[in-house]
Amino acid sequence: MTNDLHRPGGSRSTIRLAASKVPEVTIAFWVIKAMTTGLGESTSDYLVHVLPPVLAVAIGGIALVLALALQFATRRYVPWVYWLAVAMVGVFGTMAADVLHVGSGIPYAASTIFFAVVLAAVFLLWHRSERTLSIHSIRTRRREAFYWAAVMATFALGTAAGDLVAVTFNLGYLAAGLLFGVIILIPAVGYRFFGLNAILAFWFAYIVTRPLGASFADWVGVSADRGGLGVGPGVVSLVLAVLIALGVGYVTITGRRESAASQAVSADSVPAPQVRP
């Protein structure tokens, strides 16, 4: 694998980052990721109903730009900055997919295919440029740009695919959520027991978490006549925002503890200087 950090002349084409800009893939990562997908769906639904759709999309777009600017400005992974960017991608990605259907009348099947092609193009360009799609290699500005382009495409694709299953196929939000809950087991089982490529398994699961979380958020939020519990998207957004904040606080505290423990171990491993008599 080609590494930009050792590529001749690499400093002219990209700005170096001091450390990885993405978190470790743990259970906490997937839990928070799933909640951000639900937050994106419910917040988008809430905003477009309380505000003019054009204004809602504009606010979502501005919030996304500001969040990504903050993320790119950091020199390392900062939990609250990273997850704020993911949440804003979730909101705007949902709006982008919904605009194609509601605003332009494009069927969910067509928008699903369109966003799948967009995501494939991002992956192709990313791999041709960097020779890897691993999130563990996000240590340059260029790779970070490819990463966030892929993240935005996965959210839009997941939104369209989720609505395709729930609405066009008429399964309803609960059934769609359960279906995607089964589908997400494919990369987990494939990686654990059948040697599925780790990068493929990650992106497979990353895409599916979008319709999984969004379907359950819709089921809780939408009215009973649409097959939901009728809690309301505003309440769902508020609850998910609080849970995400708690999750980010948890990973921040545990990350600091692990860093401190690692530094302590490193210090203990350094041999004490010998004093000659």
Image: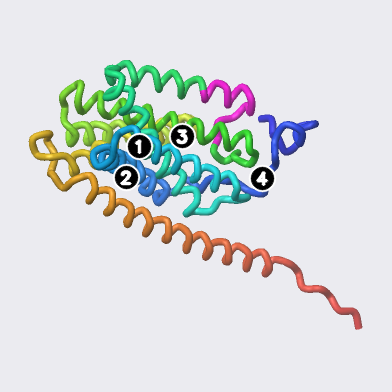
Answer left or right for 107 relative to 272. Answer: left
Start-end of magenta stretch: 122-134
In space, the residues marked 2 and 3 are separated at their CA atoms by 15 Å
In space, the residues marked 4 and 2 are separated at their CA atoms by 30 Å
User: What residue is pinned by disc 1?
Assistant: 55
Q: Label 4: few (<14), some or many (≥20) within 10 Å?
A: some
For badge 3, the amino acid type reads: Val
Pointers 3 and 4 in contact (C-beta within 8 Å): no
What percent of the width, then of the height, locates residue 181?
27, 36
Secondary structure state at the residue bearing disc 4: loop
Going from the N terminus, do you reach mark 3 or mark 4 first? 4
Circle 1 or circle 4, nearest the eye: 1
**Which numbered disc covers residue 39?**
2
Q: Is residue 167 magenta?
A: no
**Which numbered disc covers residue 151?**
3
Circle 2 or circle 1, nearest the eye: 1
